[in-house]
Amino acid sequence: MNLSYFIAQRIRQTKVASFSSTVARIGVASIAIGLTVMIISFAILGGFKSVIMQKIFSFGAHIQVTKFTLNNSYEEIPISTKADLYKNFKPGPLLKHIQVFGHKAGMLKTDDEILGAVLKGVGRDFNWDAFRKTMVSGDVVHFPDSGYSSEIIVSRRIANKLRIQPGDSLLMYFVQKPPRVRKLLVKGIYETGLDEVDNTLIIGDISLVQRLNNWKPDQVGGYEIFVTDFNRLDPAYNLVFDEMDQDMGVIKITDKYLSLFDWLSLLNRNVVVFLTLILFVACFNMISILLILMMERTSMIGMLKAVGATDWQIRKIFLYNGLSLITRGLLIGNVLGIGLCYLQDRFRLIPLDPINYFMDAVPIEWNWPVIVVLNLATLLLVTVVLIIPTVIITRIQPIKAMTFAK
């Protein structure tokens, strides 16, 4: 039988109240609170990133290809769908989907209100699965077999300003030579919380944009490309850059919405610093607890040395005790962390201001591999740190330890 483990068990089963038992409970609480905070932090951070990226990708995809130009207008110089990049596109390890788009600026007018907006024309290849997650009412645009659809989807912000809802009609004036006007039907309402999108963008049929711009059926404003894995965005970008025509320009979503992705990177750095401090406090607490346990058991250490126990056998006694405290702390921390995340995910207890945070409640992402890594990292780090205070056992002499006990 493992002597060190046996003695450690007997020490834990001792029911006599002592100062060390109170300190041990504090140690368990520090581990539990630390792990709870880490689980919640990563779940919220992942939720923020997931929700914001989902909103961005529903409109901008991961990579955008347009005609190379120095013009900063909303409207694009047309490119052809007969280009090799579009015509020969096949889903693969890096690229997943390609779709066309075209923009046209104009003025929306109802009986009482007028508002500037940009019509984003999309085709049958548009990724409606991603976009539907931003819909709050109504339905998506339906494309006719011939001609163009007069249906549009507006943002909730635009709908509130114009006081319209699904089923209402309005006029859109397009400033060009000659000026043109079209009667459009509001088919649905979306909301992303992103000012750049919600304030100006409406979704419609790209055939309408082609008609207004006098484009040919194979001419579009550009291509939007979705990647298979966002973590491999740079290799996918390089692949598109190599495949596109020389007169085309390409931009990554991380460059187009630079401020948002910089904000997400800043959140990552803040969480890393925060978690480092939590782990440092947990390690410091466990070192203090183990030192108190050894001071309280000084006479036992001296007696064990006197009967021939090795330093490593005695050190393992306190390491087993420390591991027991860590395990209990991890168990409680997982219950609290996962439980609180579930309550927030299920009942949305903590609301947010959509204007500042792009969402109406604190989001939660269930990333089980991250939770497992947090548990293993905490267990490994704190266990390694526990070896440090047990070094003091090698300096304890049996005679002095027994004298100290008296």
Image (cartoon, helix red, strand yellow):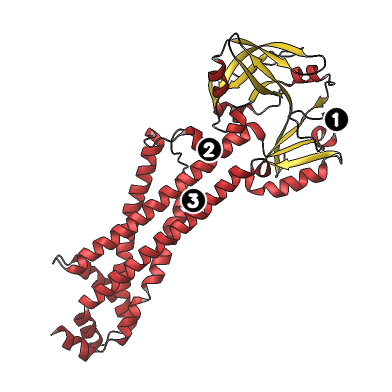
| Mark toward the start of the polypeptide (1 vs 3) | 1
Residue 353 percent coordinates (x, y): 45, 34
Vertical arrangement, residue 345 with respect to residue 139, above or below: below
**Residue type beneath disc 2:** Val
Element under disc 1: loop
Label 1 vs label 2, nearer the camera: 2
Residue 94 percent coordinates (x, y): 70, 44
Tag 3: Cα neighbours inside 10 Å, few (<14), some, or many (≥20)? few
- Towards the viewer: 23 or 155: 155
Residue 196 visible? The answer is: yes
Mark 3 lies on residue: 369
| Mark toward the start of the polypeptide (3 vs 2) | 2
**Residue type beneath disc 3:** Pro
Residue 89 visible? The answer is: no
Cα gap from disc 3 to disc 2, whole angstroms: 19 Å
For image coordinates 56% across by 50% down, the residue present is 265
For image coordinates 65% across by 21% down, the residue present is 116
Mark 1 lies on residue: 82
Q: Quadrant of the C terminus?
A: bottom left
Mark 2 lies on residue: 51
**Residue type beneath disc 1:** Lys
Label 3 vs label 2, nearer the camera: 2
Residues marked 1 and 3 touching at CB (< 8 Å): no
Residues marked 1 and 2 touching at CB (< 8 Å): no
| Mark toward the start of the polypeptide (1 vs 2) | 2
- Towards the viewer: 12 or 47: 47
